[in-house]
Image (spheres, helix red, strand yellow):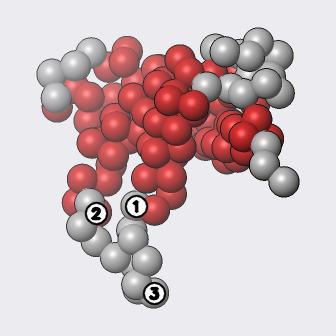
Amino acid sequence: MYNDNAGKLVVRLTLGILILFHGVDKILHPDSLGFMKSGLASWGLPEAVAYGVYIGEVVAPLLLILGVYSRWCGMLVVVNMLFAIGLAHMGHLFALTDHGGYRLELQMFYLFGGLAVMFLGSGRYAVRPD
């Protein structure tokens, strides 16, 4: 059975739910922003940009789950992940785990999942289909 709308729903829900856990963790542990602030400052960016993580890991995932502005939220997740990779994972770009997996597989899933939603849209099963 072929149903691309169900596939889009699965991608949206998977991406939204999984990245939302990271956002909730940052809400519960706001001191984790210190690392981001110092990294952004070293790039010459204002520390206030660190609060954008709440948009990329809380607001965007919630809207993805609902299917509201899905393409825009996919783009926000991509931007969020580019910052995350740049701030915390540049040394792992070409690294493997002890078990032979790609070190950044989760980050790349979020990045490319966001790209997929950005290109595919919400599908029919959404509060506000696009």
Examine the rendering and report whether any part of residue 56 can be seen: no
At 34% from the left and 76% from the top, the residue drawn is 96
- For badge 2, the amino acid type reads His
Mark 2 is surrounded, within 10 Å at the Cα level, by few (under 14), some (14 to 19) or many (20 or more) other residues, namely: few
Q: Earlier in the sequence, mark 1 or mark 3?
A: 3
Label 2–label 1 contact, CB within 8 A? yes
Most distant residue in the bottom direction:
99
Task: Identify the residue at image location x=72%, y=27%.
Answer: 123
Q: Secondary structure at mark 1?
A: loop
Q: Is residue 105 visible?
A: yes
Q: Give the residue at mark 2.
A: 92
Q: Could you give the CA–CA distance between mark 3 and mark 2, rounded to whole angstroms? A: 15 Å
Name the residue tied to disc 1: 104
Element under disc 2: helix
Where residue 59 sits: x, y (%)?
Answer: 64, 21
Query: Mark 1 Cα within 10 Å, few/some/many (few <14, many 20+)?
Result: some
Question: Which of 50 and 19 lies nearest the eye of the viewer?
Answer: 19
Amino acid type, label 1: Leu
Question: Residue placed at 53% from the left, 17% from the top?
Answer: 72
Q: Hey, which quadrant is residue 80 in on the image?
A: top left
- Where residue 19 appears, as percent x and y from the top left, is 62, 42
- Dot 3 lies on which element? loop
Quadrant where the C terminus is found in the figure: top right
Relative to 3, 22 lies left or right: left
Among numbered discs 2 and 1, the one appearing first in the sequence: 2
Q: CA distance from mark 2 to mark 1?
A: 7 Å
Q: Which residue is mark 3?
A: 99
* 3 or 2: tag closer to the N-terminus: 2
